[in-house]
Amino acid sequence: MLKEIRPAIVFVVGLTIITGLIYPLAMTGLAGALFPYQAQGSLIEKDGKVIGSALIGQSFAADKYFHGRPSATTGPDPKDPTKSVGVPYNAANSGGSNLGPTSKALADRVKEDVETLKKENPSAAVPVDLVTTSASGLDPDISPAAALFQVPRIAKARGLTEASVSALVQSQTQGRWLGLLGEPRVNVLKLNLALDAMKS
């Protein structure tokens, strides 16, 4: 019986070492050597200090900044840890709202958001990504249309021309990967950093 069990134990231990230790260490080392920026979390620095990641959105509320997609992520209520409250872009609790298209709560929130945005820019249609959350709740990008929709508010708040802010959006727009995959997009954090660097 020991004859049959011994090879099985050796096989399991060997596979555990290969797949649980050697392979992960090799892939981590390879990723760090070939893609150091991505392997370290695509961190964005300003004045030598990490201010965020290109992969995780941040909440911007001031009129002088571009706003990202709404985020449905939650976190513990500081007043009552047994309850959850909305915490936008909470990377520790990635997830969507799980509200379906027939949800009254979702319809009411979207309607309210559309009405608010229409006051900001009455002459343009509200882009869908400014009123809908992503599945992760951490989406760092918006569509070029969503960024351009916000141009009048930002130009007014910063005393800039709409043409100069629109040109900035165009310069920060990333196209499809290899010209085929994905959609054109604008990283909100990078766009706001470029906006701060603009001269009025």
Image: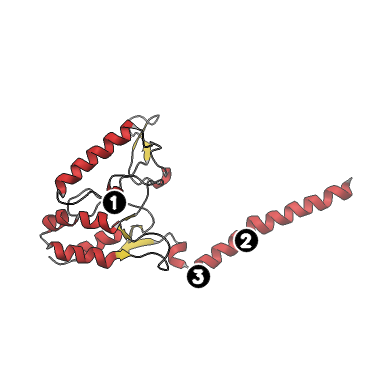
Q: Earlier in the sequence, mark 1 or mark 2?
A: 2
Q: Are marks 1 and 2 in contact (CB under 8 Å)?
A: no
- Is any atom of residue 179 visible in this view? yes
Q: Amino acid at mark 2?
A: Tyr
Q: Which of the 4 image quarters holds residue 116? A: top left
- Dot in front, 3 or 1: 1
Q: How is the image coloured?
A: secondary structure
Query: Which of the two residues, 42 or 45, is positioned nearer the viewer here?
Result: 42
Q: Amino acid at mark 1?
A: Gly
Quarter of the image that includes the N terminus: top right
Query: Which of the two residues, 138 or 76, is positioned nearer the viewer here?
Result: 138
Determine the secondary structure under disc 3: helix
Q: Estimate how packed mark 3 is, as few (under 14), some (14 to 19) or many (20 or more) residues with alpha carbons within 10 Å.
A: few
Q: Amino acid at mark 3?
A: Leu
* Residue 156 located left or right of residue 38: left
Q: Which of the 4 image quarters holds residue 110? A: top left
Determine the secondary structure under disc 2: helix
* Residue 59 located left or right of residue 15: left
- Distance between the Cα atoms at labels 3 and 1? 30 Å
Q: Estimate how packed mark 1 is, as few (under 14), some (14 to 19) or many (20 or more) residues with alpha carbons within 10 Å.
A: many
Report the residue marked by disc 3.
34
Q: Are marks 3 and 2 in contact (CB under 8 Å)?
A: no
